[in-house]
């Protein structure tokens, strides 16, 4: 075995264990793959991470969809979407899949994660979509996942979990943990009346900021970026976020209409429609604060549950 391959196998094991230590994993449901030459190295099915050794990591040809593998153990049952992502996305050098609690909770409710925090930009756009449901391990699930990840580096999987990709495994893991963090924050914001979403302009500004910081690159690999820019960015970002927050009240309707869109084109028009709808949403939110203010704590506690129901019925 080549040294480089052995190193990757060892890293897969270390990152599997990191899934446990970071709290994003449940049992052995999480799995990890890495591109190596013309194949993928992938964690085996149903083996506790502390018992995993480098030889146990399965190897599957990137172009071989027959299910053939090399290794003493079967690859993860989700090898199909791992393979499809590594094959079809040049920006994917590694894939992390898990069932972290908050990501999965949102996915059970079939909610995408909207632009509730500037860190949403770490996933390539202004939201993280929730792919439709299909049986675990199925070809259909892999297709739904690929579609939901169009122009994105992560997605939720309905009633299942999440996927994150990265140029390297370090970056894919960083994203997986960030995704669970933002999922938790979004979930909690829903419980206190719903988020105020950031505008597309604010997210665009964040993308530019990330480029300046080198935040999207591996901590270890990234060469130092010009420093003067970094000093300026936070202020600009904060200002942009403030403007966005002031301009754009929560648009719950907007967020929940998006997941329905299937194709990239449909998504674009959905986004346009959403933008067109926004002024109307303003009127709705204008009512909200008035309704909330006099409300006592008990009333506020009742509200989220009542407010959340309608979106669940949207299919
Ligand atoms: Zn899974």
Image (cartoon, grey):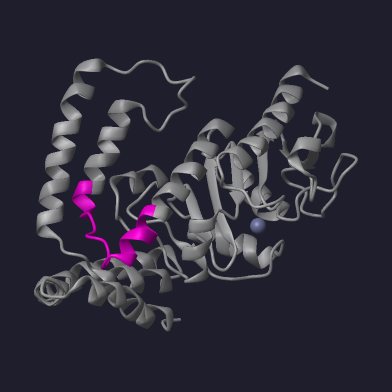
The residue positioned 68% from the left and 69% from the top of the image is: 135
Where ligand 1 lies, by quadrant?
Answer: bottom right
The residue positioned 48% from the left and 57% from the top of the image is: 102
Q: Position of residue 25 (x, y in %)?
A: 62, 48
Q: Nearer the viewer, residue 257 or 246?
A: 246
Based on the displayed image, in which of its 4 quarters is residue 159 positioned?
bottom right
Q: Position of residue 191 (x, y in %)?
A: 33, 66
Based on the displayed image, in which of its 4 quarters is residue 99 positioned?
bottom right
Residue 36 visible to an observer of this rendering: no
Queried whether the magenta region covers residue 148, the answer comes back as no
Queried whether the magenta region covers residue 186, the answer comes back as yes
Q: Position of residue 41 (x, y in %)?
A: 73, 37
The residue positioned 41% from the left and 69% from the top of the image is: 259
Side of 158 where 219 appears, left or right: left
Q: Position of residue 7 (x, y in %)?
A: 71, 22
Q: Is residue 133 above or below residue 216?
A: below
Q: Quadrant of the N terminus?
A: top right
Side of 24 where 150 appears, left or right: left
* Residue bounds of the magenta highlight: 185-202
Q: Is residue 268 above or below residue 97?
A: below
């Amino acid at each position: 075995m080549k040294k480089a391959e052995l190193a990757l196998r060892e890293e897969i094991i270390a990152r599997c264990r990191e899934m446990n230590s970071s709290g994003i994993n449940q049992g052995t449901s999480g799995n990890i793959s890495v591109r190596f030459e013309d194949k993928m190295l992938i964690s085996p099915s149903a083996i506790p991470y502390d018992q995993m050794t480098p030889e146990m990591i399965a190897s599957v040809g990137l172009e071989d969809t027959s299910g053939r593998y090399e290794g003493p153990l079967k690859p993860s049952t989700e090898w199909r979407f791992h393979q499809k992502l590594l094959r079809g996305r040049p920006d994917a050098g590694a894939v992390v899949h898990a069932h972290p609690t908050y990501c999965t909770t949102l996915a059970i409710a079939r909610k995408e994660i909207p632009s509730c925090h500037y860190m949403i930009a770490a996933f390539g756009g202004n939201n993280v979509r929730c792919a439709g449901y299909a049986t675990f391990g199925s070809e259909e699930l892999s297709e739904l996942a690929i579609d939901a990840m169009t122009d994105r580096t992560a997605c939720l999987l309905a009633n299942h979990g999440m996927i994150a990709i990265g140029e390297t495994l370090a970056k894919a893991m960083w994203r997986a943990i960030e995704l669970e963090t933002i999922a938790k924050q979004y979930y909690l914001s829903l419980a206190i009346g719903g988020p105020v979403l950031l505008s597309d302009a604010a997210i665009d500004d964040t993308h530019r900021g990330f480029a300046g910081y080198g935040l999207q690159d591996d901590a270890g690999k990234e060469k130092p970026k010009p420093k003067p820019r970094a000093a300026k960015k936070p202020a600009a970002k904060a200002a942009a976020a403030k403007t966005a927050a002031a301009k754009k009240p929560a648009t719950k309707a907007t967020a929940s209409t998006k997941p329905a869109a299937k194709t990239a084109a449909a998504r674009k028009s959905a986004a346009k429609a959403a933008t067109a709808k926004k002024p109307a949403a303003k009127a709705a939110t204008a009512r909200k604060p008035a309704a909330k203010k006099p409300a006592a704590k008990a009333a506020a506690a009742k509200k989220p549950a009542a407010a959340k129901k309608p979106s669940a019925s949207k299919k």
